[in-house]
Image (cartoon, rainbow, N blue to C red):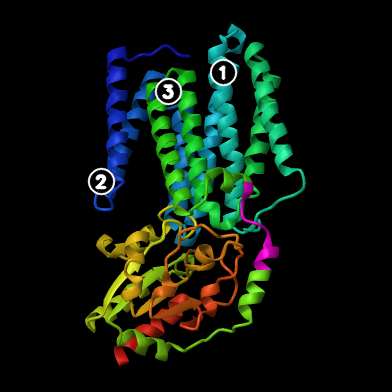
Amino acid sequence: MTAATLPNNALIGGYLASAVCFIVALKALSSPRRARWGNLIGVGGMVIAIALTIVDQHAGPDGIIPIGMVVGAAIAVPTARLIRMTAMPQLVAIFNGVGGGAAALVSSVEFLHVQPAHPGGLHVLEMAFGVVIGGLSFGGSLVAFAKLQELLTGRPITFPGQRNLHAVAAVGIVGVGAWTVASPHLAGLVILAALALALGAGFCLPVGGADTPVLISLLNSLTGLAVAADGFALDNLILVVAGTLVGTSGALLTKMMSDAMGRSLPNIVLGGLPSAGSTEVVGGAAAAGGVRSADATDVGTLLAYSSRVLILPGYGLAVAQAQHTLVELVAALEARGVEVSYAIHPVAGRMPGHMNVLLAEANVPYESLDDLETANAKFSSADVALVVGANDVVNPAARDDPGSPLYGMPILNADQATHVVFMKRSMRPGFSGVDNLLLYDPRTVLLFGDAKDSLTKLVAAVKAA
């Protein structure tokens, strides 16, 4: 590595300031009130870290780091500005994959740089770890992106002997890794990278669509670990700190989301939801009861003369970009004295916090968003539960039917409200592929149509009631 030009104390002090910025930013991001400042503080910490690295490594105007930054910014800035909210989950997945792939490449380049000098086993282990974890994250993120983009089916993709194949790949990684550490050589590193990519993609294939938010969080944690491994390999303090923060926070979020779904992480990653066979049985049994539908005028009248309405947003709201129209409906109801709040499930949407971000975009006060436990305490006294594009997170089979693939996942108890209005485009099941028994409940009425168009009609109907 190039000799440093900064005094060691100045370099360490600058990296320490950058690390403090990252820690403060992470803390601020835990609150919507401070999230904007948290982002700015995190950006400040990153600017400090990049500037120190450029100066320390003699990366002048013709250096590879500035060139890479310009190319990356040229791709990322327009992408981030033009991306639709519905595509945000897959954007997060692919950006996370790029981070994991970059970490694997950094470890690979460092390996090529030090291999002629016969590095010690510990140093090789650090680089091999970065390649493996980064490759796992990259391969898995590509599959997550394909599922979210609907290039692959959202249902679990399984085949005979799949777990055995994964086990063979894992054992192969350990064996080849030990071989590479004992006798550093490029062939071993290439094999490690290939096995890691295959295993990362392989263990994401059987993950069902409803579990994708947990998958994204897990892959984010893996990317953090890969970055931390790069930090050890390069003897770079800020990479170690930043990678550890990302890895730890991602792991904690993954655990919380697994708990919110009532499933263990091994069950989500290794098993996924069963295939459509059991879904069709459930759907067939439920369909025998039929469904009730209503028009916007009838539903608007019901809402207008209610005392308490709980709104349950889901991915369909994001697809229709109807969050601003929903806020108009809430304003019209509150003008009539109706008490309105939003019931937010931890895994509603297709990424962690998807609904929170969507509603914040429409300037919905954070105090109006009820978490799962708070919302469930209100349903029994609610006149109407208005489900806008949600599906799996309100399916009572997850609570009541031990034979359901969703059984055990905590849900929003919409069926405890006096009336349920379910806004859907069609009778198609949710992202998990599991039919929703709530659709056939006698107290449920369906309002078919695009969410934005239906909400616009509801606003007019409430005002005219």
Image quadrant in which you'd find residue 228? top left
Does 118 sit left or right of 415 as displayed?
A: right
Does 194 sit left or right of 241 as displayed?
A: right
Q: Which mark is residue 143?
A: none
Q: Amino acid at mark 3?
A: Ala
Q: Over which residues does the magenta segment extend? A: 271-280
List the residue tagged with mark 1: 125
Q: Residue at x 45, y 80 (%)?
A: 453
Q: Residue at x 58, y 61 (%)?
A: 402
Image x and y of residue 179, in percent: 68, 16
Q: Residues within 10 Å of mark 3 (few under 14, many from 20)?
A: some
List the residue tagged with mark 3: 59
Question: Is label 1 in contact with label 3 (beta carbons under 8 Å)?
Answer: no
Question: Is label 3 in contact with label 2 (beta carbons under 8 Å)?
Answer: no
Residue 7 can be seen in this image: no
Quote the CA–CA distance across marks 1 and 3.
27 Å
In the image, residue 42 sits, relative to residue 145, either above or below, namely: above
